[in-house]
Image (cartoon, helix red, strand yellow):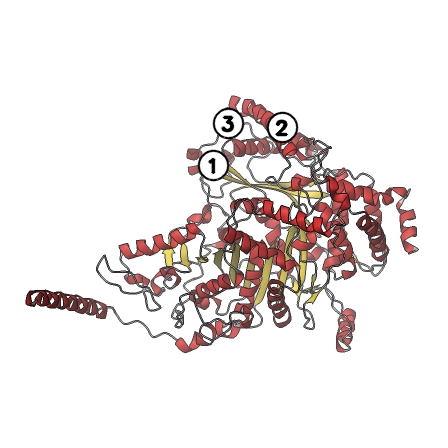
Amino acid sequence: MDVVQQKQDKQLQHQTQEQQHIREDQQEVPPQRPRQQNRWKPWWNSTADDEPNTGRIAEYPNGQGRSSPTTDFQDSVNSNNDNKGIWSKIASFATSRYRSAPIVVDDNTRYSQLNTEQINFLENEAKDIISKKSKSWCWYEAIPHISNSSNIIDSIDTPGIISVSGTGSAKCPLPLNKYPGEGGNPGYNVFINDSLILPSDNPLNFLHVQPLRTKVLNTIKNYYNFPNEQHLYLRQKKTALLKDKRIIIISVVGDLPEKYEQRSLESQRSAYYLSRKLSQNLAQEQPQRVLTLSFQCPLHNQDLIPTYKECVELLNHWAHLFKEVDSIFFVGVYHSVPLTLLLAKYIVQNNEVLEFDENTTVSVLSFQSCLQGYRFWDHSTDFTSNSYNNLGSNSSTNENDSNDHDSNNDFTTKSQQIKEKQLFQGIDKKQQDTLSKIKNYRRIDSSESKLVQDALDWLLFNWDTFRLTFFGKLYDNFMTISEKLAIDYNHPKILRNLWCNGKYMGIDLKNANNLNLDTDDEATSNINDVHVRTPNFESRLKIPTNRLFEITLWDILMITENLGYKQFIPIINLLSPFFISRSFNDYTLPPNIRKQYQNSNKIWLQEMDSKWKMNGHQLNYDQREGESLGSSSESLLPENISTVKDFLQFVQYQNEKSSDFVRIYSDIYDDDKVYKCFLYNTIFTKNPLSRKRLRLNIDLDTPTSILNTVNQYDLVWKIHDSFSKLIQLKNLPQREIPHALRLSISLNCFLDSTTSTSGPVFQRDTVEALRRLTEIWRTYQDWSPPTRGLKHLRDILSVLAMYDNPKNLINDVRRT
């Protein structure tokens, strides 16, 4: 027993000596600067309930209260926006010198004293969580030399700082040499846009400055609580509004299972990509600095509130960035839009703590928003004829022949369940439960919807410079236009835009012989005669005559919506479902269409094989590595490729054969005009004279099925009623009705195409309204859409063909 006791005493003595050595080592660490705990405590440490609408959160996932953030940070971004200097100021710590000792990270840790092993451990821990997509994480970056930064794809190698919730980096952010998420392509990245934005890519084309007479009338109406200021007006000054300004971009993107993303959005981009893309479009505005915070969140398997708390915890490290900031721009996509609005409210509510004033511009860009949820549509929407890529279809294909009897509510419910099961195919139960809550936003009395309503209402009412821009696709397979643009959310400071893809308007860039450039020069009327020496090219592409009706109709509807004429919301709700089609998504093509596309593409690839292999035109990594970023020299084009037609065929051929060498970007997230439009909507518009609350519409117009006979009759009467209201509108902007898309081609860079505009003319008469109705009648006569839903809409609106001329139509609607 004595021997055992002696051994235990020796072990205890040895452990005591080791602990003494550790304490001595820790005492050698230089003392840290005192932190300003009281400065941030009211924001970051105040008590609150789980509901985020209070704007304050005290508890964190580990259950421990956070001490004050590292407010001893200094803004290390100099005039050249260099990241240097911030690394050494990151909170860091001293740990045990023994390899077997665990790494404990707390609020007192310092990065500068970490050894290589500890840094590697924390980096691997963060990257492991990122790969698992189980926690929210943030990437901070100061955009270097923004005026010269033209490359968006290769910027993935720019250094930044990462912070991952649930890891040591959540308390001790880690500097990395490059972005740790997915992205980047070693080959060529070609941006090809053949698109159109409705009502315009610039509010100067449909808004005007508020006249003194209107200002006086609105003031009187506001005094007597009469409706007033139904839309925004333009500023008097429209130049250099962001010059030498300090800007922060906060992008928030939620992860989605791959199959779900393909069947719903078709694709989305990372938060980092959106931040870089928006910062790229800020270059011409010449800001003093641009800082970005890109949040990637696990919204596919985690509810909104826990994710919100994770993001707030990560924001703790970047509070110092907001000091005296001039503009804060937010970007969200689909199910991350509610989270984006909650974060915007949280930051704005604490503007005094963050040291920016009420003049700071705050604006949100929403892609394909889920604020109105979604529902599935039970009509077959296959292409039947005249489809894009010149593909035919089996007109006998009809996946829901029994939809004419959709009056049975049980059938409707069962149909919704079947389609939801198809959407959730291949994902686990937890993800299904989380993602299924998105559809709850459709009910304005649901807890999900009320949470967002409260946040948005607070922002709209309390922050004068707040703006919200909704962007959605005109042609979609999943959500209607009303849903994506949250049409039932009414407020003057909400602007809405539609993005129209030429791919679904009968324009096939592979078959460039059929393209029709919109130019006054007869020598360039044929695509073969347009010669290019570099991959950068821009022009206008005429919209096929048989599809102009869709653009003409939605152009005037988007103008009335942004000018505050809410009487047209019912017709928008009725028309939206007809623009849903499985064929408007490459991943949801009907089997017969997919087979025809594959056969057609096989023939095309064989033709391109013989064409390009004979001439020896192949891209390789050696050629790519030898070029400077954003270069536009002639060497970027292989010999004998000197026309737009050849270049379009060549890059699409290479994209099909070797996507690692050539990758094409042509979605809504890649269009620079979208980001420019968002910026213009924000900086060119004047604050309303009085504060207004968010108003919600009760949607009683959206049909359950476009094939229901009652709904069809309702649509005929509603559109007739809408025409009668349209011709009564005065002071509509007199401008050209869109008849061409913007075609732009660029390689690895931003193609700036800003043009000055004098703005439209506004006359206080109904001349423009009558002209619009005349154009609707005229374009309908040639309308020949390809999808079953649009063909059905054409048949319903066949009443327009009964009028011999537009005058008869105008006289008829005047009598109602």
- Is 96 magenta? The answer is no
Going by the numbered disc 3, the residue's amino acid type is His
Q: Which residue is mark 2?
A: 600
Q: Which residue is mark 3?
A: 617
Q: CA distance from mark 3 to mark 1?
A: 16 Å
- Foreground: disc 1 or disc 2: 2
**Mark 3 or mark 1: which comes first in sequence?**
3
Mark 1 burial class by Cα count in 10 Å: few <14, some 14-19, many 20+? some
Secondary element type, mark 1: loop
Q: Is residue 724 left or right of residue 385?
A: right
Q: Residue at x 24, y 63 (%)?
A: 96
**Residue 653 location in percent, x, y?**
55, 31
Q: Residue at x 53, y 61 (%)?
A: 304
Specify the quadrant that holds the N terminus. bottom left
- Foreground: disc 3 or disc 2: 2
Q: Which residue is mark 1?
A: 660
**Residue 663 location in percent, x, y?**
52, 38
Residue at the extreme left: 2
Q: Is residue 638 visible?
A: yes
Write down the quadrant of residue 779 in the picture.
Answer: top right
Instruction: Give yes or no for contact between labels 3 and 1 (Cβ–Cβ under 8 Å).
Output: no
Q: Is residue 543 left or right of residue 106?
A: right
**Residue 328 location in percent, x, y?**
54, 63
Going by the numbered disc 2, the residue's amino acid type is Ser
Q: Residue at x 61, y 68 (%)?
A: 454
Going by the numbered disc 1, the residue's amino acid type is Asp
For the record, the magenta segment spans: 82-86
Secondary element type, mark 2: helix
**Mark 1 or mark 2: which comes first in sequence?**
2
Q: Which residue is more in the foreground, 655 or 645?
A: 655
Write down the quadrant of residue 378 in the picture.
Answer: top right
Instruction: Give yes or no for contact between labels 1 and 2 (Cβ–Cβ under 8 Å).
Output: no
